[in-house]
Amino acid sequence: MKKLLIPALLAALLVGCSTTPLPEDSNGAPVESRSGSSSTGVAPVTAGGLDASGLPRELTDPKSKLSQRSIYFDLDSYEVKGDYKDLVASHAKYLVANKGFKVLLQGNTDERGSREYNLALGQKRAEAVKRSLTLLGVTEAQIESVSLGEEKPKDAGHDEAAWSQNRRADILYKAADGRGEF
Amino acid sequence: MKMNAMSLFFRFIFLPFFLLTAGFAQAQLSIEITGAGANRIPVTIVDFPGDPAASRVITSTVRADLERSGLFKLVDHNGLALDENAPINHADWKGRGADALAAGSIARSADGRMEARFRLYDTQKGVSLGGAAYVTNATQLRAAGHRIADFIYEKLTGEKGVFSTRIAYVVKARGQFLLQIADSDGQNAATALTSTEPIISPVWSPDGGRLAYVSFEKKKPVIYVHSLASGQRHIVANFKGSNSAPGWSPDGRKLAVVLSKDGFSQLYSVNADGSGLQRITQSSGIDTEPRYSADGGTIYFTSDRGGSPQVYQIGANGGDARRVTYEGSYNVSPRPSPDGKSLAFISRREGRFQLAVMDLASRQVQVVSDSNKDESPSFAPNSRMILIATEVGGRGVLSAVSSDGRIKQRLTVAAGDVREPAWGPYFQ
């Protein structure tokens, strides 16, 4: 999920620089000792409240619940767990209030078994998230649910720790102007 | 005459070779034989007089093909060269243990191409079993060798040979996915498609000219049909949701596909140009991995309608589905054999995913592989061998297993993972 990671890192950078005051002695300090991850000490800001993906910051700011885009599933389970009820509700609320926005729901599975059967199982996970969203008022036209099966593992390992990361559905956003994550 | 198959196991590694694929990642494919048939036919292929380099290419191709099949034992020809018209001392060859002998010659034809002539003899009966002449470009001598090996195979076993066929598979190397085509011996590999996104489920059109497959280049699974000679490809199914698991109808006009546009994964048929979509199944669960039977009348597929994934069969236009597999809780990826007699599928047994073959007349099931991460079976056009993807030492490899499980070959790519094999139709 490189696509999700880059805006998230960018947002982290922005937040980090804007909320941490510069040390008081920074004026006279040599450049090399300046703290922070940016060597210039200048935080890049994009006008209009959009980040690099073209999405509103509330979708990408790590402090915003809407930046949480992954829903994890138990082994052999295709139902959205109670733990994710609030998360799904937050996304539903956003989509109901912003009808121009669309989401691509990508279902994923662990690597065991047939690739094509896993593709169908990943579809079930994406459909479960879709159903949760539509029950909360999101329109069908705003949602496309697809499956990546076992083809795009988040964790390339071959143990339960990796597999639990790969039993997942991700939410990708696209704004009305076509900019976004898919 | 019954011999212990284990005592005949042998290992034979063909030297790896380099593939040159226009600027793309290179992949080395090598074949290793890990099991052979119990009663191998002893045969001698003598050297063919004529152009020595061309003779070497052709005779070594014939010998390697026959040996790799697991059905023949090569009897040493002691460096002897004999053309197709030379007198044969049958008693002498019989005495050396050769039941059959092939002799031939290489000549340059009037138009500058190479002509390979050969004749096959039955040394037991002291008769000729026939012969043939193949004219090829100098660059395609191996193809002539495969044709000769097919002739010998058919005369001596009574079944058509598959040495002249091609295989398709996907290599994952250095973050790229390569859809490759190679000769059945793994040589002559060429890359048909390179992508940074996964490619799965390649299947050959019955005429051998096109592949259908699923590509994720649009961030979701979409079905394409790709003409190999021209490189032209078009989208067959890109509906809302996922589009996957293509399977050609035997007449090459239609594809059975799996779409999620109406909810969960369901079977549809579509013309090869993407027109004429028709729904085949109407279930509330998963229906996937459709494969037409050899006669085109029915479709085998995987469904979880009974609670666990099992193989079912349905009319090509729909109707009532009949359950085919019962043993165990995970039977997927059904592939009916081209001769209509058996069904290969992947069965999970005690946590191992293994290749199983069902005799469709008796419904008897036999597990034929000894690996444990088998996937994506694909029958050779003569129904004798089944190509699967499996894993050895954490790496994806291809394995060819005879439908009785006795003969095993392994195909590996040194530079990466190889998966999603598809055995092409007979040479046309």
Image: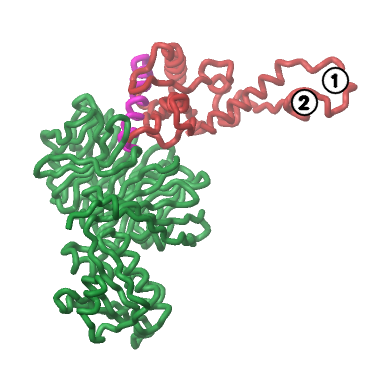
Chain colours: A red, B green
Query: Where is residue B297 drawn, in percent x and y?
Result: 12, 46
Horizontally, residue A70 falls left or right of residue B110, namely right
- The chief SS type of the magenta part is helix
- Camera-nearest residue between A97 and B166: B166
The answer to whether residue B178 of the structure is visible from this angle is: yes
The residue most toward the right is A28
Q: Is residue A137 in the magenta section?
A: yes
- Camera-nearest residue between B232 and B206: B206
Q: Which residue is mark 2?
A: A41
The answer to whether residue A102 of the structure is visible from this angle is: no
Q: Is residue B13 in the magenta section?
A: no
Residue type (three-letter) at the residue carrying disc 1: Ser
Query: Where is residue A124 drawn, in percent x and y?
Result: 32, 26
Tell me, yes or no, whether the two marked residues, 1 and 2, touch with CB atoms within 8 Å: yes
- Camera-nearest residue between B298 and B358: B358
Horizontally, residue A170 falls left or right of residue B357, namely right
Dot 1 crowding, Cα within 10 Å, few <14, some 14–19, many 20+: few
Q: Which residues are magenta?
A: A114-138
**Residue at (31%, 36%) from the top-left corner?**
B353
Q: Is residue A150 above or below residue B408?
A: above
For the N terminus of chain B, give its image quadrant: bottom left
Q: Is residue B165 above or below residue B114?
A: above
Q: Secondary structure at mark 2?
A: loop
**Residue at (90%, 22%) from the top-left corner?**
A28
Q: Secondary structure at mark 1?
A: helix
Residue type (three-letter) at the residue carrying disc 2: Gly
Q: Which residue is mark 1?
A: A26
**Residue at (39%, 29%) from the top-left corner?**
A109
Estimate the spatial distance between the alpha carbons at disc 1 and disc 2, rounded to whole Å: 10 Å
Q: Is residue B215 above or below residue A1?
A: below
Query: Where is residue B45 drawn, in percent x and y?
Result: 30, 73
